[in-house]
Image (tube, rainbow, N blue to C red):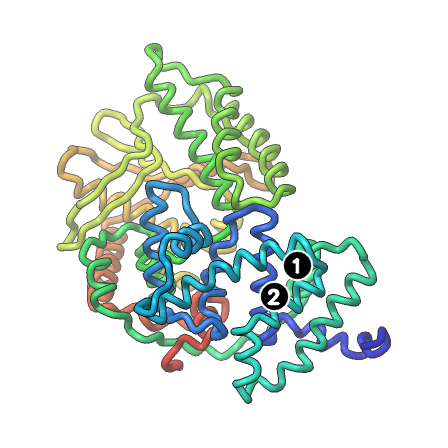
Amino acid sequence: MSTDQYEHHLPEVYNLPKQPFARKVLTIMRYIACELDTPYSGDDLLFSILHFDFFNIPAEEIAKVSRRVAERGYKDKTSLRQYLKEWHNSHGLTMFTPAAEQAMMEFSPLLESWIRAAQQVSLQQLFTIIINEERISRSLRINEEDSHHLPEIVLFNAFIAEEVLREPTLTLIGFMNKIDEIERVDNVLPSPILSPEIPAMDPLFINPLLSGFMMNVTALNNYLDCPLGFFYKSIIRAPYGRSESMEFGSAVHHAVEKLFQKMQDNDTNTFPSTEEFIEDFLQYMTRNPESFTKEAFERRLQYGREILTNYYNTYISQWNKVVSVERNIRNVLVSGVPLKGKIDKLEFDGNKVNLVDYKTGSYEKAAVKLHKFDPPGEYTPNGGDYWRQAVFYKILLDNYKQKNWQVTSTEFDFIEPDTQNIYRKEKVTITPADVTTVTQQIVSTWNKIQEKDFYTGCGKANCRWCNFVKENNLYITLHQ
C-alpha cells in the first residue's frame, strides 16, 4: 500500500482498535509489551487472550486456573503466566490428557515464543508471526464469516509499516502508546444497554467456592455494581493486571501502617522519623515494581516522597496513639450472613471508637464527581461506595461480640492532598436508617449469591466485564 493509498484509508486506520480481529491482535501485542517492560505484569490481558476463540479453551477451565492462581498468590508471589509455564513444564501431554487441559498447556510455549520473538524481530515481523500462528490462521481460514478480515489485516500491516517509516526506532511499547492515543481521541457512541448472560458453571467447581464465602464490603460493592463483575472479581478472582494507582495506594498504606506499628513497639510510644517513614514506602515500591512502567515507577517514587513527607508534618502532633492498626475481623454474623473486614485503623477513647480508612486518589473526584460519600439518592440509588463502606464497618464492629466497642464515627483519611494542597479527612454521619438500608443490601445480596444469581451482567456501556463477555462471545443470551 502506497503512502497516498494509506492516507486515503486513514479513517479506517483509526477505526482499527474497534474491529474484533484487530482488537484481539492488539491485545496480544499490548500483553507482550507489558511483559517486556515488566515481566509478569500483564495478567489481566492474558486472562482476556486465553478466552480468544482462536485457542478453543473453555471459559470454565480458565476460571479454574484463575482461581488457583489467586489462592496460591496468598502465600507465594505468582502470576497467570508463571503458573501456565510451570504447569506445562511439570505435566507432560499424554493421549489421556483432556482436550481443555491440553489447550491450556500448549498455550504457554506459544506465549513464551512470542515474548522472545518481540526482542529479536521488527514490529512488522512480530505482527506477521502472530497472525500466522497455526490456530489463528486456521480460524481465519475455516470461518467464512471472518473473510472480511483480509483487508483489515492488510491495513493493520500498512499502519505498522507507515509508523515505522516515520519513526525507524519505534519499539513495540512505543507503538502501543500510539494506539493508546488513537483510543483516547476516538469518540465511541454509547451502545444499547444489553446485559449478557454467560452459561452457569459446573456446581462441583462453584459450590465449594460459595460454601466458604464471607461477605466483605468489596464483594458487596462489586455485586451491587454488576453481578457478572462480582463473579469474575470475587468468585473466580480474575487477575487485575497492572494498576499503577492501586499498587501506589498499597505502598502508601503499608508505610502508614508501619509508622503506627513502630510507634506501638517503641517503649516511649514515639513515632519514627520522616526518613524511616519514607524508607518503608520505598522498600514496598522496590519489592513490587510489576504494576509500573519504568517511567511511572520513578514518577511515583518522587510523588510518594513528597506527599508522605507533607502528610507526616501535617499530622505528627495530632495523631491519637491509642490505636489498633490493620485489624482483621472475621465470622461476624449479621442476620445469618457471615461478614469480614480489614480495617486500617481504630482510634480509641475508652471503648468509643473512631474508625479510620486511608484513601489515595483525588478527594474532589471521590466526593463531587463520583458521589462516593452520598447516601442513596438521585445519583447513587444504592448509595456511594464510601458511604456503604462506612456503614458496613459500623455494622461489622457493632456485631463483633469479642469486644465491647462503640463506633461513634467513621473517617476517611486522604493521604494525597486536594487541588488546594490541603489534606482532607471526611467523616460520615451514620443514622439508624443507614444501618437498616445496608443490612438489607447485605442480606439481599447474600441470598442472590447463594442462589448463584451472578451469571447476568448489568449491561452498562462502560462495564469492563459485560464488554469482555460480549467482545469474546461468551454469552448465551443478551437481555434488554
Q: Earlier in the sequence, mark 2 or mark 1?
A: 2
Task: Choose top left, top right, bottom left or bottom right for residue 158.
Answer: bottom right
Q: Position of residue 9 (x, y in %)?
A: 77, 78
The residue at the point 53 percent across, 29 percent down is 282
Q: Of residues 311 and 76, which is closer to you in this image?
A: 76
Badge 2 vs badge 1, beta-carbon distance below 8 Å: yes
Residue 362 is marked as none
Q: Which residue is mark 1?
A: 176
Crowd band around label 2 with a 10 angstrom C-alpha radius: few (<14), some (14–19), many (20+): some
**What whole-number distance in Å separates the C-alpha atoms at marks 2 and 1?**
8 Å
Q: Position of residue 11 (x, y in %)?
A: 73, 76
Left/right placement of residue 395 relative to residue 156 reads left
Q: Position of residue 442 (x, y in %)?
A: 24, 57
Q: Amino acid at mark 2?
A: Leu
Q: Which residue is mark 2?
A: 26
The residue at the point 25 percent across, 70 percent down is 202
Task: Choose top left, top right, bottom left or bottom right for residue 77.
Answer: top left
Residue at the extreme right: 4
The residue at the point 80 percent across, 77 percent down is 1
Q: With respect to residue 450, does 373 lie above or below? A: above
The residue at the point 24 percent across, 31 percent down is 352
Left/right placement of residue 368 relative to residue 175 reads left
